[in-house]
Amino acid sequence: MDTRGAGERAGEWARHWRWTGLPGLDLLRARYVHHSFPRHSHEGYVFGAVTRGVEEVGLPGRTERAGPGTVVLINPEVPHSARAGVPEGWAYATLYPSASVITEIAAEVTTVRGTVGFAETLVEDAHTAHLISEVHRAAEEDNALAADSLLRVAVARLLRHHGGPLPARAARTAGAHMVVRAREILEERMADPPTLEQLAVELGTGSFALLRAFRAAYGMPPHTWLTDARVRRARRLLDGGAAPAEAAVAVGFSDQPHLNRHFTRIVGVPPGAYRRERAADRLRSAARP
């Protein structure tokens, strides 16, 4: 089920879905021309194979350009953005495996201890890019054996050639404890968050000190992080069958149009289309013998 409409007239289309045959994995196949992804992060990994055009990936302190045959590797919780790098935009096939999926494969094919990660963001690897596209093809053909096999081969190849241990987090200072607590407060009061000044007063610090410390820790200011967190929670609600209007109120957006705008920018498809794909996946799962 491709998500098409006004965007199709501009040459844009996207499908963001989950398939029962591959638990712990989301898939996105899309072409974007005008759409851009704001700064956000993911709980799991991102493996994106560019098939046409150029994608510009914004990372802390730098921007990188990915063309056909390039695989974009994003570790969990790394803030990044994306947009077209050429007027014709870019097309890609992307896999979003959970941390548990990568950990399981890494345990079989590497000797890395602890959480694995990738030091490089872009790797020129046409073969692995092709494997990622073939995972999509196999899933769309409902071929579980092929999809699972191709996924494991692609991930194993990336881990062997580009993987390693994620750097250990720096020891928490008093300031680090402060921003962790700030994040907890925003998560707890997502539907009715404090202002920056109120949050700073509650934490016993100044507004600008909190702003600087939060940005240093999470790669984005508190209000941007909160929007990303709201969209993540809305996704979980939609996964469970909630209507977009219900999800919007539950996560603190003023109305459904606000959810639609932020969700589409960050996820790449509107919440209604995302929910329909989840419902279709549940139906496919129920129909399986």
Image (tube, helix red, strand yellow):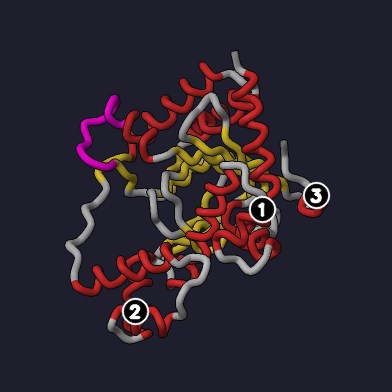
In-image side of 53 versus 129 (left or right): right
The picture quadrant where one finds residue 111 is top left
- For the residue pair 173 and 193, the one nearer the viewer reads as 193
- Label 1 or label 3, whichever comes before in sequence order: 3
Spatial CA span between label 1 and label 3: 19 Å
Q: Please identify the dominant SS of the magenta region.
A: loop
In-image side of 33 versus 123 (left or right): right
Q: Which mark is residue 173?
A: none
Q: Amino acid at mark 2?
A: Leu
Does the stretch in magenta take in 109?
yes
Residue wearing tag 1:
244
Viewer-side label of 2, 3: 2
Q: Secondary structure at mark 2?
A: helix
- Label 2 or label 3, whichever comes before in sequence order: 3
- Label 2 or label 1, whichever comes before in sequence order: 2
Which stretch is magenta?
106-115
Does the stretch in magenta take in 216?
no
Residue wearing tag 2:
210
Q: Amino acid at mark 1?
A: Pro
- For the residue pair 37 and 270, the one nearer the viewer reads as 270
Where is residue 275 drawn, in percent x and y?
A: 65, 44
The picture quadrant where one finds residue 99 is top left
The picture quadrant where one finds residue 140 is top right
Q: Secondary structure at mark 1?
A: helix
In-image side of 36 versus 233 (left or right): right
Q: Secondary structure at mark 3?
A: loop
Are circles 2 and 1 on residues that touch, CB within 8 Å? no
Where is residue 237 drawn, in percent x and y?
A: 56, 48
Q: Amino acid at mark 3?
A: Gly
Query: Is 42 above or below relative to 240?
Result: below
Where is residue 197 drawn, in percent x and y?
A: 41, 85
